[in-house]
Amino acid sequence: MKQVWTREEMAQKVAARMKDGYYVNLGIGMPTIIPNYFSKDTTIVLQSESGTLGYGARAKPEDPNYDPDIGDAGSAPLLVKPGMSIIDSAACFAMMRGGHLDMTVLGALQVSEEGDLANWKMPTKKVGSMGGAMDLAAGAKTVVVMMEHALKDGTPKIVKKCTYPITGLKCVDVIVSELAVMEVTDKGIVVKEMAPGYTLADIQAVTEPQLIAA
């Protein structure tokens, strides 16, 4: 029986790739739920362009130290943790551009077979939302994309060449979708794990580049 991974299961798979002591930036959307799945034995230091360093998971009004003015990249309230710092924009972007982040997890509109990333603007819209995506794509040591595998009509989002405006060239290392965990290599996109019941042929049907079995 085929069963796609839920967003929570996708978040668990991304969280499992983070090592103790990692400094990590999480993009808007699906990546923001990842802190819910950190191991209690692992210390991950989260950084956000909003000016927070060392924050926790998303906060609820009933949580101690709840502060609606302290938010993540999507402005959702964050859990204030002991030792958390509030830093200015210059310090945030210095971390991002200076190679001080071990990993960033971003959403995507398209990812090419060479790891090119397009995630800030659709050709059909006059404006986009850049944020710190270009800085993160260029500066983070590992770039993970967490996204839906294809559009609702089945159009692939993993493509041979990006047709949307590029965020970063050859920057994506790992793609986690509801169908598979994939690594971008010099030889192509390698499928490391598949959702229950799915075959390589199933995933290939909604993917433009030729996939490689691990």
Image (cartoon, helix red, strand yellow):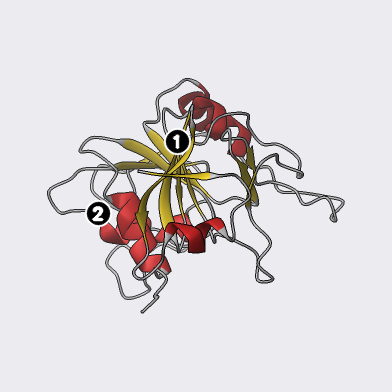
Q: Which mark is residue 38?
A: 2
Q: Secondary structure at mark 2?
A: loop
Looking at this view, name the residue that lies furthest to the top: 98
In the picture of the structure, the residue carrying the numbered disc 1 is 87
- Tell me how far mark 2 sits from mark 1, CA to CA: 23 Å
Looking at this view, name the residue that lies furthest to the front: 201
Residue at the (52%, 41%) spot, across then down: 49
Residue at the (36%, 67%) spot, across then down: 8
Few, some or many residues within 10 Å of mark 1 (<14, 14–19, 20+)? some
Q: Earlier in the sequence, mark 2 or mark 1?
A: 2
The disc labelled 1 sits on which kind of residue? Answer: Ile
Q: Secondary structure at mark 1?
A: loop
Q: x, y (%) of residue 12?
A: 30, 58
Taking the image as shown, residue 78 lies to the left or right of residue 156, namely left
Q: Is residue 78 above or below residue 190?
A: below
Q: Is residue 209 above or below residue 10?
A: above
Residue at the (27%, 66%) spot, across then down: 64
| Residue 57 appears in view | no
Mark 2–mark 1 CB contact (< 8 Å)? no
Residue at the (36%, 31%) spot, across then down: 102
Q: x, y (%) of residue 25?
A: 43, 41
The disc labelled 2 sits on which kind of residue? Answer: Phe
Q: Quadrant of the N terminus?
A: bottom left
Q: Nearer the viewer, mark 2 or mark 1?
A: 2
Looking at this view, name the residue that lies furthest to the left: 41
